[in-house]
Structures are given as structure tokens and as C-alpha cells.
Image (tube, grey):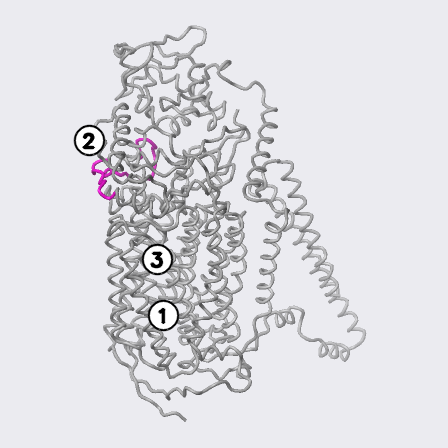
Amino acid sequence: MAQVEQFKYDNAIVRKFAYATLVFGAVGILVGLLAALQLVFPALNFSTAETTYGRIRPLHTNAAIFAFVGNGIFMGVYYSLQRLLKTNMYSKFLNEFHFWGWQAIILSAAITLPLGLTSSHEYAELEWPIDIAIALVWVAFGVNMFGTILKRRENHLYVAIWFYIATWVTVTVLHIGNNLEIPVSMWKSYPVFAGVQDALIQWWYGHNAVAFFLTTPYLGLMYYFLPKAANRPVYSYKLSIIHFWALIFIYIWAGPHHLLYTSLPDWAQSLGTVFSIMLIAPSWGGMLNGLLTLRGAWDRVRQDPVLKFMVVAVTAYGMSTFEGPMLSIKSVNAISHFTDWTIGHVHIGTLGWNGFLTFGVLYWLIPQMFKTKLYSQKLANAHFWIGTLGILFYAIPLYWAGWTQSLMWKQFTPDGFLQYGNFLETVTQIVPMYALRALGGTLYVGGYFIMLYNIIKTIRAGSFQAYESAEAPARVATAGAHKGEYWHRWIERRPVQLLIGATIAILIGGMVEIFPMVMIGDQVPKIESVKPYTALELQGRDIYIREGCVGCHTQMVRPFRSETERYGPYSKSGEFIYDRPFLWGSKRTGPDLHRLGNKYPDSWHYNHMLDPESMSPGSIMPPYPWLIEDDLDNSLLPAKISVLRTLGTPYPEGYEEEAIADAQAQAEEIAASLRKDGIEGENLEGKEITALIAYLQRLGTDIKPKPQAGNE
Amino acid sequence: MKNKALKTLSVMLPLLLLSAVAWADAATEEGGSNPYFYDDFLAWSLVALAGTVVVAALVALFYLLNVMVKVNQIRIYQEMGIEAYQEAVTEKGPSFWERMYKKWTDAVPVEKEQDVMLDHNYDGIKELDNSLPPWWVAMFYLSIGFAVVYMTYYHFTDAGMSSAEEYELEMEQAEKAVQAYLATQANLIDETNVTPLVDETALAAGQTIYNNNCAACHGMLGEGGVGPNMTDKYWIHGGDIKDIFATVKYGVPEKGMISWKAQLSAADMHKVSSYILTLQGTDPPNAKEPQGELYEPQADNGGSEAPATDTTATTATDEEALGMNK
């Protein structure tokens, strides 16, 4: 019998992450509420660049995912890891480095995103210096976790830790893969891959950010905190094994379901569809193991707010992991994609699964660490009901809005015209739904602040124990297999093998999908007439990226009659080969812009950017007056041209030197056309607006629209 | 007896579904629109409604049958005496649903969970050795089967259509449907035969079309903006209803006026052209200076009822107008 050893659990680091979770949760949902209200009351964009929707939206998503959920993950991991392994953390220095490093990254995101410094990849918007910082801090977390695992006193790794390991390795791979970019300057870079390849890699990342940042670590937390809170044995060990391996293997393939009916080759789209369908069972495995663990404790679920939150969280997880595969079926996706349905869907996941599980954990953990009871069960119950109501008020109006708008987009008159030819009609129709959604968000925020109050009161009443004494027998390193044990026990004793196994499982899907797209040239058929952007267009494109236009406007006309009639010929993959990054977008709050070029006069764009309502009465698009006031900064142009040529854009040798003059010449042409239409203004040719107009007028004009049939 | 009824039901249901699908297919073909089901929402709703009614009827029948069987059993037991009844009851195992539930969940009951308790203990968390729920396993296999069939159908055989082929088909079917519809419509309006509409509903509809599509460039009141003023008597491309209709229909692309024939039906262009004529002489605030040539309506086409009250804005020369109007 091994000797019993004394040690201390480090609660101080857990408390730090818990406080960060509480603070950034409030920030994340408040910024989200602002974004929701901006869609109802465009005045809330405040006509200021930093507070405009296009920059606020990524701030909200990053705050919710990486600041709130991120800190939530670390809180839960640092608490449960020590206890599941019967040891303290590997390194106090790495604890602190990880904590402060992560908060510094959040702070830099909160500064750079409103400044418009963005790579425009959804949920990976941060520019390259911050990407490097994230990689460093993430590696520090990994080292700390593995160091802890290696010095464990427990022979076997519990299922929660399998999930933590898979999370760590996959996020590492995804983060690096999706942020391969070449810097132009300190705060500007271009991605290595362009167009359809960039899109595939982005959604391989984007989908798996959901999978391996919002799902697998939280499954790990569920496997620790739910049985602890319910004091019940986990329902099925076998189910844990099968659903863990199946989940991490299959999840990675499903990314292309974000690109159905786009220019991505059909074979890759189909893989996205079928792997999404195959994901239902592995996902539900987690839900079942969570819910069935509560067998024999359902009477307590009625009373204990911790369990209530957990039950709704796990149920929301089950609902959204069923809904997701349904939305991945192409005929459903044809209706749902680019509408608010998707927004409703992800919020069932984030508000329900991530939010409520975090709340459940906090309500359980804070009294544990502060050696006291929760200040008020009543308030926690109130939070539960208000929060649940908030989720319903959030999601249902958006489902309604998504359906309504999609049906309006697709409605034809019998004589072959779009019933709602003006896109704006389909937006004003759903603004009341946006208002209801904002109400749902307000409820959720209200519940959150009730929790904050309750937790602060609990903390005040308790006494925190930074280092909690514990004891456990030393691990007998030689302890091997015993007769009749389940085969999986073998790998549970071998963290390195488990890490390698998980790595192999998560690499296969990505490789099968991405390698052919990147390596085989004919996956993206070349179109002769597609030429690189001119210097001014490139500048305009970077302004488009900076302003986050992609948050509301897609550049992807899908092969549907309703889209080609509205916008023009459907988008071909060969048109995007110089698009670094791709700007296909994922949501149409405004119309698609891929065929915008030459549709309106230059002056229309000028007036529209200055005051959208002057050209489109009732529009909810925010105004962009600063584009008209601010001078265009061409100083980075030579560096941009040079970086893009390195990446393969065929700019002629020496174009760097001519680029600025070329841009000015084109700007003068546009300024002249603006003046012709009676637009006054000093130095029009030197303003940012001319670059943006140049880009918008270029969009989709490389291939000649075919004459359309059937409109006589 | 109960099982027999169930078997009947299990045969009936697929048949019912098949017929429903066939019906919906027929509906699609008649509508002749496109392969997406939402266009035949009504047809599908009817199918769903009919299906529900039939299923409800079957359930009711089944229930009735059950009651009759029970009544019959009571009669038999009354004849055979209490012993026979007790014997039957003790013989009778769990009900069909209980057996199904047991079979498909295969869970060890909570009371007996100590039998499957593993010796795992992680910070007090224990694990049970319950089997994988068979329904879950079945669902997993089904989804894998779906994946194989789907990939084979679309990518390893010629059976499935690619996105591009689906699009071609959709356009073809739409074209046919539109032509079929147009064949039923008499006397299409075009720029050779158009006359101004005067009834108020049509003009109100014209105003809506104008506000949605034209006001951006020509002003909410027709006062002009990026595009020319519509309220004065000066026209660049002619002020007759036929000219206006043609301008709307074909556009003047080199000057920024787009062609609307792909976005507005002939009837809509008719309405909006007629509405534009009613703006004559309304003299809105902030009106743009006149452009183009003076146009006086002919008596016979009734183009503009509004008398020429505004004589102040007649100073523009053609030269100026051309200069101002890109």
C-alpha cells in the first residue's frame, strides 16, 4: 500500500478565473445587447466608427466565446483537474502566466476590434501579434495541464480529462491552421490562402471553435460538476468512451456545412452534410450521459438551482446538436442559411449550454470555495426562470424572422418576378422580431445581474481558503492492467498515448477535406477574365474589412433562381482567387454584394455611405460619415502589394512603386464622377470613400453577366 | 389480438406515407414550379393534415378494437370463473410498451445499480457500467448508413444532381411555369400600347413601387436627386407615358438609370409610370433644376392632367441640362 501524501489544492487560481468569468460574462452579453438594439434603433451606432455594428459584433462574439466561456473553461479545468488527479497544479508561475496572459489578450482584443484591426475571419478576427500571444498562452496552459497530469496520484484519467486533452490539442491545431498569415505591418496581415481555400479553412476552424472551445471542454466540465452536484454515479462508462472518440473524430469533418450551395466543390459540401448527420448520436451520447446520471435525483432537480441550470444546459446542448445537423441538410440549409435562424440556433447553444452550465458551476463552486452556503436560493431560482424566458424570447423570434425573411427572398410572382424585389422590404418586415429578440437579451442580462448580486453576497459571507488541504496515496507507477479490465483502461493510464490518439482522430477529417482543396489545382477552375484588384480597390477592400461590412453583407450568390434573379449570376470559385481574406460572410442583414459593381452610380454609394436612409428610406444600415471625412492612408500600399505578390497575386514587378500613383489616378476618376453628380467637397480624391467606391464598383464585374432569360 | 392490430398498423403506416409522398409529388408536378418543397407549402400542409386525420382515425379504431377485446374477455372470464382470470393475469408479463422500453433502453434500474457499479472513483465520482442505449446505437448506425447512401447517390453514381444541375433544372421549370402563366394573360402591356392609368388603387400601388425603387435617386416627392426632377415639364427622354415606360423598362445605363425589366413586371412598370405622370406640377420643396426638353402633353393621350402652373422653372437651357446630368 502506497504511502498517503499530504498536499494542497490551489483555489486561488480558480477564484481568479471565476472572477474573470463573472466580469467578462457581463461585458460579453452587454455588448451583445447593444448589437441587438442597434438592429432595431440604428441611432445606437452613434455615428462613430468604434461603436458601429460592424465592429461591435466581433467584439461581442469574441468577448462571449473567448473571454466569458474561455475563462469559464479555465475556472472549471483548474478546479477539477487538481481534484481528479489528486495533486496541485504543476506550476504556480504558469498559473499566473496563463491567467494574466489571457486577460491581456482579452484587453488587446477589446482595444483592437473597435479600432477596426481585424483579419475578418469569424471568431479569429484578432490580428497576428495577438494570434502569437494566444498561441503562447495556450501552450503555457497545455504545459501546465500536462505537467499536472504527469505528476498525478490517480492512476487513470477520468473522461473529463480526455475532453480537456482533446480540446487542447485541437484548438492548437485550429488556431495555427486558420491564422497562417503574412504581416504587412504591425496591425495588418494577409492570409496565406485565398478565396474558396481560405473559406474552407476558416469554416474548418469556425465550426470547430464551436466544437472544441464551446463543446468539448464544457462536456469535460459537465462530466465533473454534474455528478458532483447531483452526487450520483455517471450513467455509463462505455457511453463515455464511444461518444468521446466518435465526437472528436466526426466533429472535425463537419465544417463545410457552413458553405453549402457556395462555390465550394460539391464533394466537400456533401462531406460536411453527412458528417453533420453522423454527429447527432455522438453529441447525444454526452447529453444522455448527463441526463441519465440524474436518474434517482430528479426530485432534487426541482429544488436545487444548480441542477436546474445543468439540466437546461444539457437539454439545450441536445437541442442544438440535433438542430445543427438538420440545418446541414442542403434543402433545409437553402432556407435557413444567411438568415437569423442561424443566429437563433447558435444562441440556444451559447445562452443555454455554455451560459447555463457556467451558471450552474458558479452557483455550486463559489459556495464550495468560500466555505459557505449560497446567499439566496430564491434569487438563483429567479435567475433560472428569467434566464430561461430570456433564451426563449431570444430564439423564437429569430426562428420566426429567419423563416419569414427566407420565404420573402424566395417568393416569385406568377409572371416570374421577385415578389419582394426590394431587399429592404424583407428587413423592415422582421424588425419587430429583432425588437423581441432584444427583449429576450435584456431578460437574460437581467438574470445575469441577479446572479452577480447573489454571488457577491455569497462571497462576502464566506471565508475563502486559497489552499485547501488534501491527501491521497502516491501513485504506484507500475500499476498495470488487472485481469478482466475494460480495454480502454489501458489508454487511460497513458496520457501521452491518449494525446497522440486524439491528435490522429482530429487530424484525419481536416486533412481529407483541406489537402485536396489546397494541393490540387483543378479544384478551383481558373477564369481568364479574373484579374487582381487595383491598388485603390485593394485599399477599398481593406476598408470594407476594417468596417466589418462582412458582418451584414455576404458576397456569395448561391445557385438559386431567387438569388440569380435578385443579384446576378451565381458566384464561381474562380472569381475569388485573389480574395485575401475571403469575404463570403455568413449572414444577410443587408443584401448580397457580390454583383454590386456597376449597379448604382458612384454618387449613389457616396450618399448611401454618408446617410443610408437618403438612398434607402427605412434602412437600418448605420451611416459611415468618417469615410467621407478621413483621408485615405496609402503608406502601406507598397508593402501590401509586395506581400500579396509573395502569396501569389500576379502584380507585375515594380508595381509597388507605381501603386500609390495608380491609386491616386483612379481616385481622381471617381472624384470627377462624384463632382459631375453635384457632390461638393474638398479633396474628394484623397478620402477613404473613393477607395471604398472603387472596390464596390469592381465587385463581381470580372465575369460578364449572361443575358437573362425569361424576363420578357 | 393486440399484436395483430399493431402489425396491421405497421403495414398501414408506410403505405400511408408513400401515398402522401406520391400526392405531394403530383402536386409539385402540377404546380410545375421547382424542386423545393416550400413552394408547395399548401400541398404539404394538406398532406400533413390528411395524414394526421387518418392516423387519428386509425388510433381511434385501434382503441375501439381494444375495448371490444376487453369486453369480450370479461364475458369469457365471467363464464369460466375467477380461477381462469387469475391464471391469465399471472401468466401475463409486462406490457408491449414496457418490453419495448426495456429492450431499447437496456438500462439497469436505479435500485439495482450497485450490480453495475465500477470500481472507478475520481474525487468521489463513480461510474456505472450501463450498456450503450440500443436506440442510440441504432440511431448512430442509421446515420452512418445515411452517410454511405448519400455519398453514393450524389458522388459515386450519376443519380444525384450537382448544385449547378439543380439550378439549371430550377430555372427551366420556372421558365416553363412563367410562360404557361403568361399564355393565360391577354394583351401584355409594352411601350407601344401603354396608356396612363387613372384609378386610385393602381396609382397607390404605383406610388409604393416608386417609393421602394425610384425615390432613392429621384426623391420621395419626385423632386430629383442623383436623378432628374420628375415634377417639372422638362424631360430628358420624353414625357409621354410611352417614353416614360420605355425609360423605366430599358433604363439609360450610360447615365446611371438602370433597366427595371428584370425587377418589375409590365403591370408594375405601367403603374409606376402612371404614378410618375401624376407628379407633374406638384412643385415639391428642394426641387432640382429642370433638365431636358420642354414637353407639352398632347390632348389625346391625356398624359398629364395637371395644368402647367409652375412657370418659374423654365429657364434651363439644354446645354446646362446636359452638363448637369451624367
Q: Position of residue A679 (x, y in %)?
A: 24, 26
Q: Nearer the viewer, residue A152 or A661?
A: A661
Residue at image coords 41%, 33%: A701
Quarter of the image with the N terminus of chain A in it? bottom left
Disc 1 residue type?
Answer: Val
Disc 2 residue type?
Answer: Asn
Disc number lying in front (1 or 2): 2
Residue A361 numbered tag: 1
Disc 3 residue type?
Answer: Tyr
The quadrant in which residue A350 appears is bottom left
Q: Secondary structure at mark 3?
A: helix
Magenta span covers which residues?
A: A612-636
Q: Position of residue B213 (x, y in %)?
A: 39, 28
Q: Is residue A610 visible?
A: no
Q: Looking at the image, tell me whether mark 1 or mark 3 is earlier in sequence order.
A: 1
Name the outermost residue toward the top: B299
Q: Would you say residue A626 sits in the magenta stretch?
A: yes
Q: Secondary structure at mark 1?
A: helix
Name the outermost residue toward the bottom: A1
